[in-house]
C-alpha cells in the first residue's frame, strides 16, 4: 500500500514547475534564504522541555525578548535593554528555540520537496538530524505547562500541536530519502510520541485550541497511516466535524467573536483539510469551512482592515490587516479553486505584500490576469455574532451586541468601534500579548470599551438583540438599534455556549440583575447621533465610557479631580480631570492622524464628565478617555458625532430636553436636521 502523504502529487508537480518560474522567484528565493539562514545558524535542541512561548516577552513592553542562540541565563528586552531571568523566561526561550528550529527545517524540507535530491546534502541532512534528535529526546521529556494544556517541546497543548504539524510536514517532504531505520526511529520516537501526548491534551470542548490539537492529530494520522487516529481527530464527540458544526455560526464567523481568532482557527482548519483531502475528501465539504475564508470579506473596511473585537492581536485593524492572511487564501485556493480567493490575493499583493511561502508555490492561483477588487460587498448585519455596521465610503461604525465568545470574549455589550478615513478613531483595543499586565485589570473589563457599566463593575456575560436596522445605503438615514438585558436570576438562562471552554467569571452582579441597556445610532452622510438609554434595578453609578486615540483638543478649563478609584480597573485612568460643573450639554474634540472627531453631548442632570488618559494598544500609545457618570435608576445619554479631515460641516448642535423626549437639532450650512430621542421607543 502506498504511503499516505500530506502533499498530493498535483501539489508537488506545481511546486516543482513554479520553482523555476520567474513569476515565483520571490517565493523561491525567500525559501532558499530561510534554509540558508537555518543551516548557518545550525540550531540544535537542548535537553530540557520547552516552556510557554508567550513567556518569552518583556513584561514591561510586551514585546518578544531578544533571542540569543547561546541560551544565556538572562534575556534582554529590545526596547530598554533590561535583562530578565528566571525559569519562565528560560522555558520561553526553549520554546522559542524549538520554534526557530522548526521554521528552519521546514524551509529546508520545502526545498527538498521542490527539487528532490538536488537540494543538496545539507538541506536534507539538517532536517533529518533534527527529527532524529527530537525522536530520541521526546519520550523522556516531561510534560509541562500552566495554561490550556501541556507541551513537551513547548509549554502548551496548542503550541505543541502547531509544532507537531510542522514536524509532520517536514517528515512528509524528506521521508522518501530516509533509510528504513531512520523512518522507524522518527515515527516511533517522535510522531507516535506526539500523537500520544496530544491525545492526552484533548479537553473535549469547542475551542480554537482543540481545533489545532485535532488538526495535529489528523496530520499524524495521515502520515502514520493510522485510521484510528484520523477517526479520533475527525469523528470524535468534539472532533473536527463537531467543532465546525458548533463553532461556525450561521453567519459564517467562528464563534469566539474575534476576526483574529477566526483566522487563527482557520489556519489549523485549513491545514487539517489539506492533510485529509485524500483520506477524507468529504471533509472539504464540511458546512461553513470553505466559506470561513469569505466571511471576513463581508465585514471588511475599505482599507482591508477589520475591527479587533474580543481577544486577538489588533494588527487586523491596521490598514491592509487582511494581507497577513494571504497564505490562507493561497492554501484555500488549492483546496477549493474559488476565483474570489484569487481576487483577495491580488488585493493583498497589489499593496506590496510579497508573495512568499510554500502555499503560494504549491497551491495558489495563477494571478496573471486577476484584478484586485476595490472593495467587497458589505454585509451590514451579522446576526449570530451580533455585529451591526453603519458605513459609507469613508466611515465605518460597528455596534457589537452578540454572544460573549467563550474564553476569548470581552464584556463589551453595545460597544461602538469608530473608524473613518483610514484611521482607527475610537476602536476596540483588541488584545496586547497575554503576558501584558493590562490583560486582567483593563483589556478584559468593560471599562476599556466604548459602552456602559453599572455600579463601576464590568458587565456580566450576556447576549444582546438587534431591535432595528436600516442600511443608510437604502434609506434616507441609517439606524442601528440594539439592546441587552440581564436576567434577574442568571441561573435561569441556559448558557448557549455550554460546551465552550470558558473562563471562570462572575455571571451574577446584583447591579445588573434585571438591568437593560439600549443603544440607538442614527446615521447621516455628515454625522451620527448616538443615544444610550439605561434602566437599572436600583440606584447606582452609571458610567458611559468613550476612548479616542490621539489627543483631546484645546480644553484648558479642565479641573483636577481627587480621583479615588474603587478598584484596579479604574486605577488605570491617569491624568484624571473633569469638565467644570456645567449644564447638561458639552462638546469635546479629538484629533488623530489628521482626522478630527467632534462630539456634542447631552447628559442626565447631575452627570459628572471625567476625562483621563488610558493605555491604548499598543499600551505605550496613550488614548483619551471620557467617562460620563450619572447616578440613578435610569439614564439617557445623547451625542452627535462628526468626523472629518479638515474642518467639519456642523455649525451648531442644540438640545431641547422635553422630559420624556429629547430633541436635538443639528445645524449644517445647507439644512438643519431635527431628531426626536424618546425615553423609550424608536428614535427618529
Ligand atoms: Zn522591556
Ligand atoms: Zn475588547
Image: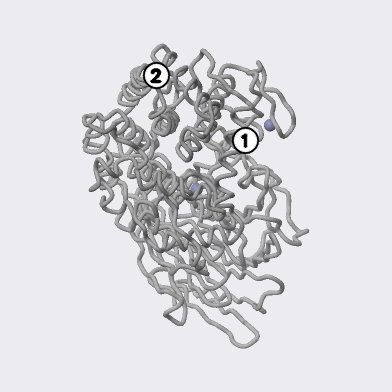
Residue underneath mark 1: 62
Q: Which mark is residue 162?
A: none
Would you say 350 lies left or right of 290 here?
Answer: right
Residue 2, image x, y percentages: 26, 33
Identity of the residue furthest to the bottom in this view:
670
Q: Nearer the viewer, residue 531 or 187?
A: 187
Q: Nearer the viewer, mark 1 or mark 2?
A: 2
Residue underneath mark 2: 182
The residue at 34%/35% (across/down) is 210
Which is nearer the N-term, disc 1 or disc 2?
1
Identity of the residue furthest to the front in this view:
118
Would you say 245 lies left or right of 385 here?
Answer: left
Would you say 548 lies left or right of 534 here?
Answer: right
Relative to 627, residue 433 above or below: above
Q: Nearer the viewer, residue 662 or 59?
A: 59
Relative to 181, residue 253 above or below: below
Could you give the CA–CA distance between mark 1 and mark 2, rounded to whole angstroms?
Answer: 41 Å
Residue 504, image x, y percentages: 38, 33
Note whether residue 105 is visible: yes
Amino acid at each position: 500500500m502506498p504511503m499516505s502523504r500530506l502533499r498530493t502529487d498535483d501539489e508537488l508537480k506545481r511546486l516543482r514547475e513554479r520553482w523555476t518560474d520567474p513569476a515565483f522567484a520571490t517565493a523561491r528565493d525567500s525559501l532558499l534564504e530561510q534554509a540558508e539562514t537555518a543551516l548557518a545558524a545550525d540550531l540544535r535542541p537542548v535537553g530540557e522541555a520547552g516552556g510557554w512561548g508567550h513567556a518569552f516577552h518583556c513584561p514591561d513592553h510586551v514585546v518578544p525578548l531578544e533571542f540569543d542562540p547561546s541560551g544565556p541565563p538572562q534575556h534582554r528586552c529590545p526596547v530598554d535593554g533590561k535583562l530578565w531571568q528566571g525559569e519562565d523566561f528560560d522555558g520561553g526561550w526553549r520554546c522559542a528555540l524549538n520554534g526557530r528550529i522548526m521554521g528552519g527545517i521546514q524551509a529546508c524540507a520545502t526545498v527538498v520537496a521542490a527539487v528532490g535530491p538536488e537540494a543538496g546534502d545539507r538541506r536534507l541532512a539538517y532536517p533529518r538530524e533534527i527529527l532524529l534528535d527530537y525522536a530520541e529526546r521526546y519520550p523522556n521529556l516531561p510534560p509541562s505547562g500552566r495554561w490550556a494544556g501541556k507541551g513537551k517541546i513547548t509549554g502548551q497543548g496548542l503550541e505543541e500541536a502547531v509544532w507537531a504539524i510542522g514536524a509532520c510536514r517536514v517528515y512528509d517532504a524528506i521521508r522518501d530519502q530516509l533509510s528504513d531505520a531512520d523512518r522507524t526511529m522518527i515515527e516511533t520516537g517522535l510522531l507516535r510520541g506526539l500523537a500520544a501526548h496530544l491525545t492526552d491534551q484533548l479537553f473535549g470542548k469547542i475551542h480554537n485550541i482543540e481545533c489545532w490539537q485535532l488538526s495535529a492529530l489528523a496530520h499524524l494520522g495521515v502520515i502514520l497511516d493510522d485510521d484510528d487516529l484520523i477517526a479520533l481527530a475527525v469523528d470524535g464527540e468534539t472532533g473536527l466535524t463537531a467543532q465546525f458544526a458548533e463553532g461556525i455560526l450561521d453567519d459564517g464567523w467562528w464563534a469566539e467573536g474575534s476576526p483574529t481568532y477566526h483566522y487563527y482557527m482557520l489556519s489549523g482548519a485549513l491545514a487539517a483539510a489539506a492533510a485529509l483531502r485524500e483520506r477524507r475528501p468529504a471533509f472539504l465539504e464540511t458546512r461553513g469551512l470553505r466559506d470561513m475564508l469569505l466571511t471576513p470579506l463581508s465585514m471588511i473596511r475599505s482599507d482591508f482592515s477589520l475591527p479587533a473585537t474580543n481577544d486577538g492581536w489588533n494588527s487586523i485593524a491596521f490598514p491592509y490587516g487582511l494581507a497577513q492572511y494571504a497564505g490562507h487564501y493561497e492554501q484555500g485556493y488549492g483546496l477549493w479553486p474559488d476565483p474570489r480567493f484569487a481576487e483577495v490575493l491580488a488585493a493583498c499583493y497589489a499593496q506590496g505584500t510579497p508573495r512568499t511561502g510554500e502555499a503560494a508555490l504549491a497551491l495558489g492561483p495563477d494571478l496573471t490576469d486577476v484584478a484586485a477588487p476595490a472593495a467587497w460587498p458589505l454585509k451590514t448585519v451579522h446576526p449570530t455574532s451580533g455585529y451591526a455596521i453603519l458605513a459609507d465610503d469613508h466611515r465605518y461604525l460597528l455596534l457589537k451586541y452578540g454572544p460573549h465568545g467563550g474564553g476569548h470574549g470581552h464584556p463589551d455589550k453595545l460597544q461602538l468601534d469608530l473608524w473613518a478615513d483610514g484611521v482607527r478613531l475610537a476602536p476596540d483595543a483588541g488584545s496586547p500579548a497575554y503576558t501584558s499586565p493590562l490583560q486582567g485589570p483593563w483589556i478584559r473589563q468593560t471599562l476599556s470599551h466604548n459602552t456602559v457599566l453599572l455600579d463601576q463593575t464590568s458587565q456580566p456575560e450576556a447576549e444582546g438583540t438587534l431591535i432595528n436596522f436600516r442600511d443608510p445605503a437604502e434609506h434616507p438615514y441609517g439606524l442601528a438599534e440594539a439592546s441587552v438585558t440581564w436576567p434577574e436570576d442568571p441561573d435561569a438562562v441556559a448558557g448557549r455556549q455550554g460546551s465552550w471552554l470558558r473562563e471562570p467569571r462572575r455571571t451574577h452582579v446584583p447591579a445588573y440583575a434585571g438591568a437593560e441597556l439600549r443603544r440607538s445610532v442614527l446615521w447621516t452622510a455628515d454625522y451620527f447621533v448616538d443615544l444610550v438609554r439605561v434602566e437599572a434595578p436600583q440606584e447606582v453609578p452609571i458610567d458611559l465610557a468613550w476612548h479616542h486615540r490621539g489627543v483631546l483638543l484645546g480644553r484648558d478649563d479642565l479641573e483636577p479631580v481627587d480621583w479615588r478609584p474603587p478598584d484596579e480597573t479604574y486605577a488605570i485612568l491617569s491624568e484624571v480631570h473633569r469638565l467644570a460643573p456645567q449644564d447638561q450639554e458639552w462638546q469635546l474634540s479629538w484629533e488623530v492622524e489628521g482626522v478630527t472627531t467632534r462630539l456634542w453631548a447631552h447628559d442626565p442632570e447631575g452627570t459628572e464628565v471625567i476625562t483621563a488618559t488610558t493605555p491604548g494598544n499598543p499600551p505605550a500609545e496613550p488614548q483619551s478617555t471620557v467617562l460620563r457618570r450619572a447616578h440613578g435608576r435610569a439614564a439617557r445619554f445623547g451625542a452627535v458625532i462628526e468626523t472629518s479631515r479638515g474642518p467639519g460641516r456642523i455649525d451648531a448642535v442644540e438640545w431641547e430636553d422635553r422630559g420624556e423626549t429629547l430633541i436635538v437639532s443639528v445645524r449644517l450650512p445647507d439644512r438643519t436636521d431635527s431628531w426626536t430621542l424618546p425615553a423609550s421607543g424608536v428614535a427618529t
